[in-house]
Image (spheres, helix red, strand yellow):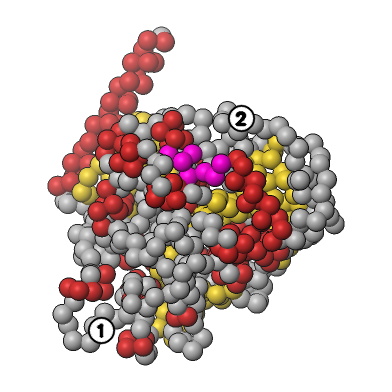
């Protein structure tokens, strides 16, 4: 009896699979699909995920499939363990004999070209500008959507920042429709230097879960650095590449911090040269899906240095996205920023970064309730800032720390995580070691520069042999070269604590190791012991 039931089930599976093959053959013959992306077993049989070609003049959009994937949002069932698929829609065939998913991407595969305003200036022989740029020559009459985010309120607990429950739904889905939707539109126009969606990505086996990506196009086509790497503070140079020289088609929308409890969206607003707007633009050399740039007050031509207002704006963007898998990053000069024009980077990747999972050791709590911790068991010595009675308090504390590093010529990277609730600050010295000849030739040959995304655990590799041989040990060895020594890290912390006004009160307390939920205790080259400091919302206690 049991054998007969098993035979019947196998026969049913075969029949369903044959049905699926017939449907697939029909779609292929009709040129409705251009390839299978994956074949999956499901309780009722097998499902085929395919690329769907949209007919000319016809656009079909639906919500992402429950399958999820690299581009699908977690709210729609995105799976961190599956990095194969990109965001898009889908539809299904259901009958009494089979169950069939067809994966439809909103992104259409088109030849990737460099737009005229991304070519080298020396190759442009046209009279005048002709680039539709952000300069005075082209700005007159320019318009762009404007998104004014809602005002954030504190929770009163000093732990998390929340949005008023009385606020209505935003007029447009900020992350799904505005950021990712507009990014896909620019993808279809061929405005990127290469197709990042074709880059291979995998999770490196091990405790940390480093993510490796093979991105040969970024190495070959990324704009070269045009300034000194030994000075964190440098003046803006309008003769070198900056974001006023990009084409207006690369801009997605204007972004500002609103004063109302509700977000506002204006589909077509002038670009006001007298009131320099902050804009979100595509990164034409993307690392990941939805890779964009936040450029504060773009027409003011600010150099790449942190100030209080700009960091607060970046936190507002993270909070408005309201998704832990959408992060913002910052690279200072000397820490592998390649353009000396103030900007933050951001992209969506449905996986936790190893940096976010690292355990931390509490050091101090400021008078405004901002808790500062040191990461332990991680290759790059870093600080974690979180809490505060308001987003302004958190932003101001980190800004003070960054200004201190800038004035002391200490390169650093920033990761804004957890929808703006956590900020990781990573002082580093890789470029300095590289200039002094202290980095091994083996690491130099990889041509990987540990900027914010690499330090966070997303390893962007440029050679196929490095990708195929990627290991946790290799990732750790590269990142450890960027880390300050233990002694230097203590000196830098002392400077930071003095800058934020926490150096006059001292008290030694027992250290408490904070282990993030879902992460694992990992061994490393640093000890967990030693006196550290603690504090409350009404005091600021610092390690001697």
Q: Position of residue 100 (x, y in %)?
A: 33, 40
Mark 1 neighbour class, 10 Å CA radius: few under 14, some 14 to 19, many 20 or more? some
Tell me what residue is drawn at x 58 percent, y 64 percent: 407
Tell me what residue is drawn at x 39 percent, y 15 percent: 5
Picture quarter containing residue 135? bottom left
Residue 506 in sight in this render: yes
Residue 175 in sight in this render: no
Is 73 contained in the magenta span? no
Picture quarter containing residue 258? bottom right
- Left or right of residue 485, residue 142 in this image: left
**Extreme residue in the right direction:** 538
Q: Which residue is mark 2?
A: 521
Q: Position of residue 25 (x, y in %)?
A: 18, 41
Which residues, given as a range, are shown in magenta? 478-485
Picture quarter containing residue 510? top right
Tell me what residue is drawn at x 26 percent, y 79 percent: 131
- In the rendered view of the protein, which quadrant contains the N terminus? top left
Q: How many marks?
A: 2
Q: Position of residue 30 (x, y in %)?
A: 16, 51
- In the rendered view of the protein, which quadrant contains the C terminus? top right
Depth check: give the residue in front, 433 or 299.
433
**Extreme residue in the front direction:** 436
Q: Which mark is residue 357?
A: none
The correct choice, above or below, for 529 with respect to 488 in the image is: above
- Left or right of residue 122, residue 382 in this image: right
Q: Which residue is mark 1?
A: 129
Could you say whether the residue bearing mark 2 is in a helix, strand or loop?
loop
- Left or right of residue 404, residue 54 in this image: left
Mark 2 neighbour class, 10 Å CA radius: few under 14, some 14 to 19, many 20 or more? some
């Amino acid at each position: 009896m049991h054998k007969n039931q098993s035979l019947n089930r196998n026969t049913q599976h075969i029949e369903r699979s044959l049905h699926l093959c017939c449907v697939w053959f029909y779609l292929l013959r009709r040129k409705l699909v251009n390839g299978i992306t994956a074949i999956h077993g499901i309780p009722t049989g097998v499902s085929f995920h395919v690329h769907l070609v949209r007919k000319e003049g016809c656009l079909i959009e639906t919500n992402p499939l429950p399958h999820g994937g690299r581009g699908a949002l977690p709210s729609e069932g995105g799976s961190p363990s599956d990095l194969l698929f990109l965001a898009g829609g889908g539809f299904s065939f259901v009958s009494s004999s089979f169950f069939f998913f067809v994966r439809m991407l909103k992104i259409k595969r088109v030849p990737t070209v460099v737009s005229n305003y991304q070519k080298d200036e020396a190759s442009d022989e046209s009279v005048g500008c002709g680039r539709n740029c952000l300069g005075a020559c082209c700005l007159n009459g320019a318009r762009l959507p404007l998104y004014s985010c809602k005002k954030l309120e504190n929770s009163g607990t000093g732990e998390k920042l929340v949005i008023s429950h009385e606020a209505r739904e935003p007029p447009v889905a900020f992350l799904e429709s505005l950021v990712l939707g507009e990014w896909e539109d620019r993808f279809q126009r061929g405005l990127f230097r290469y197709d990042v969606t074709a880059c291979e990505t995998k999770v490196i086996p091990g405790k940390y879960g480093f993510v490796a990506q093979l991105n040969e196009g970024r190495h070959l086509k990324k704009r070269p650095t045009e300034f000194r790497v030994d000075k964190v503070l440098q003046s803006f140079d309008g003769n070198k590449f900056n974001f006023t020289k990009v084409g207006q088609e690369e801009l997605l929308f204007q972004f500002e911090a609103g004063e109302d409890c509700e977000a506002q969206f204006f589909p077509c607003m002038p670009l006001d040269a007298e009131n320099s707007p902050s804009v979100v633009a595509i990164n034409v050399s993307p690392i990941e899906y939805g890779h964009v740039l936040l450029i504060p007050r773009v027409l003011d031509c600010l150099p790449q240095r942190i100030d209080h207002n700009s960091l607060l704006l970046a936190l507002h963007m993270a909070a408005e996205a309201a998704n832990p898998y959408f992060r913002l990053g910052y690279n200072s000069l000397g820490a592998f920023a390649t353009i000396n024009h103030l900007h933050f980077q951001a992209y969506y990747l449905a996986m936790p970064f190893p940096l976010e999972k690292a355990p931390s050791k509490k050091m101090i709590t400021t008078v405004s309730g901002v808790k500062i911790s040191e990461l332990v068991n991680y290759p790059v010595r870093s600080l974690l800032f979180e809490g505060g009675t308001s987003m302004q308090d958190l932003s101001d504390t980190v800004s003070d720390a960054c200004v201190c590093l800038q004035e002391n010529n200490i390169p650093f990277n920033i990761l804004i995580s957890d929808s703006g609730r956590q900020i990781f600050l990573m002082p580093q010295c890789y470029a300095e070691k590289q200039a002094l000849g202290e980095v091994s030739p083996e690491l130099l040959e990889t041509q990987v520069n540990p900027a914010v995304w690499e330090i966070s655990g997303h390893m962007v590799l440029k050679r196929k042999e490095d990708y195929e041989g990627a290991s946790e040990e290799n990732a750790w060895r590269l990142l450890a070269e960027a880390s300050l020594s233990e002694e230097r890290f203590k000196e830098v912390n002392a400077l930071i604590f003095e800058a934020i006004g926490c150096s006059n009160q001292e008290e030694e307390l027992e250290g408490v190791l904070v282990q993030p939920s879902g992460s694992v205790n990992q061994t490393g080259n640093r000890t967990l012991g030693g006196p550290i400091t603690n504090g409350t919302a009404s005091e600021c206690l610092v390690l001697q």
